[in-house]
Image (spheres, rainbow, N blue to C red):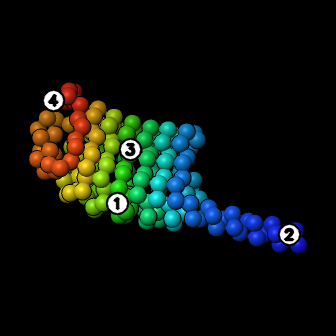
Amino acid sequence: MKALLSIIFLMQFFNLIAQTTDLNLKKQKLKAIPDSVFNQPELKALNLSKNRIASIPREIKQLRKLEVLNVSNNELKALPNEICDLLELKELIIYKNEIMELPTCISKLQNLKVIDVWANNIDDPTLAIKELKKLEQAEFQVNPIKQETQNQLMELLPNTNFKFSSDCGCK
């Protein structure tokens, strides 16, 4: 009887985990995203900030219901194209990484309202975001984006609140 109760408890526990909608793995000293994260089909918010993650695996596309992804303060050099399969994504928070460019397919994320990429090394996000008509906030401080590009972005997306550095340090 005890064994049966243990099995029932474990089944309920794993069912509860599978139904998790918010997962906070902030400051866990992770070098990689645990595989178990991708087995959570109901996940809507994932916080992986302040870790040592160097890449996002292609399996990220399995999180079809994800609305908020925070991978800030990591060691990312690029985002995989599979991030563009997260069609429910509303907030993409990737500040303080080493990203040089955004995948152009980000334009498929038509529900995206916030993109926060300050303190990376992105010089021209135009192709990636110019079609994001629902974008409300775009934070690009501490990126080498020329004034000409900043003006172009503000013209293309007039309803978006852009934040740029006053001196991008670019030529």
Q: Is residue 165 above or below residue 84?
A: above
Q: Residues within 10 Å of mark 2 (few under 14, many from 20)?
A: few
Say whether disc 1 or disc 4 marks the residue closer to the N-terminus.
1
- Identify the residue position indicated by label 4 in the image: 171
Secondary structure found at label 4: loop
- Identify the residue position indicated by label 3 in the image: 94
Q: CA distance from mark 1 to mark 3?
A: 14 Å
Secondary structure found at label 1: helix
Task: Residue type at mark 4: give it.
Answer: Lys
- Horizontal side, residue 43 vs residue 77: left or right: right
Q: Is residue 116 visible?
A: yes
Residue depicted at 27% across the width and 44% down the height: 138
- Identify the residue position indicated by label 2 in the image: 3
Task: Residue type at mark 2: give it.
Answer: Ala
Q: CA distance from mark 4 to mark 3?
A: 25 Å
Q: CA distance from mark 1 to mark 4?
A: 31 Å
Cβ atoms at labels 1 and 3 below 8 Å apart: no
Task: Residue type at mark 3: give it.
Answer: Ile
Query: Where's residue 74, x and y in %?
Result: 46, 40
